[in-house]
Amino acid sequence: MEDSERDVDRVLDRLTEVYGDIPVHRESTPVPREMYVECMNAADNDELGGVRSLVSHENEFLLVRESDDDAWDVPGGSLSRNDTHAAAGTQYVAEQVGLECTVVDAFAAIKREFTLVDGGEGVTGLWVFFEAETFETDISPSSGIEEAKWFSHPPNAVGPHLSQRLSAATGDD
């Protein structure tokens, strides 16, 4: 097992201690050499991974559309050095939509391994999906957010890994 995967497993163990069992999906992405080097550097700096936070208020949840994407997603982004996943989750919500929130659960994680297109060992990062709550409803989207909106039912076009969770949260199974 590579070092980055061991590090990811340690983080998952800590998250499980706080939030209980978290479904973990594995993905593998072959990348060209220069992107692989970027992934290796990010892993060396504890920055290979990210978060998404599904923020709710009463019976609604917040979704955003970024300027370069037609699908609705939840606020989030990449880790920075020394960030915990939960801290990064609340930070991205504040930065992207101007809301203070509290992380209450983790509902999914992705262990993504990046490998060279021509084979060899990979490097692994962790992306965590959180549920968060807020008492605020006034949204102030940042410049990278095209639109932010409260929903009571999921729209048709949602980001990957969200449609099942949104349907379960609203009883639209």
Image (tube, rainbow, N blue to C red):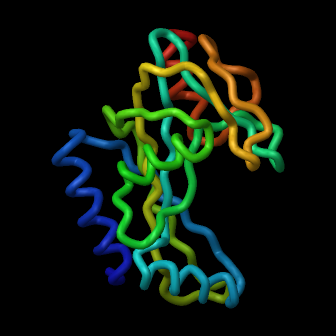
Q: Between residues 119 and 79, which one lies in front from this camera angle? A: 79
Q: Which residue is found at the position 43% from the left and 81% from the top?
A: 45
For residue 60, side relative to residue 111 (left or right): right
Say which quadrant the C terminus sits in: top right
- Measuring from the top left, give residue 107's x and y in whole percent: 39, 37
Examine the rendered structure and indicate whether residue 162 appears above or below residue 127: above
Q: Which residue of the protein is positioned furthest toward the left in this rendering?
A: 17
Count of all numbered marks drawn on residues in the image: 0
Relative to 4, say whether 155 is above or below.
Answer: above
Q: Residue at x 35, y 39 (%)?
A: 106
Q: Is residue 137 left or right of residue 31?
A: left
Say whether residue 21 is left or right of residue 129.
left
Which residue is depicted at the point 56% across and 80% down? Answer: 39
Q: Quadrant of the N terminus?
A: bottom left
Q: Position of residue 50 (x, y in %)?
A: 50, 58
Point out residue 8 in the picture as x, y percentages from the top left corner. Answer: 34, 67
State whether residue 97 is above or below residue 173.
below
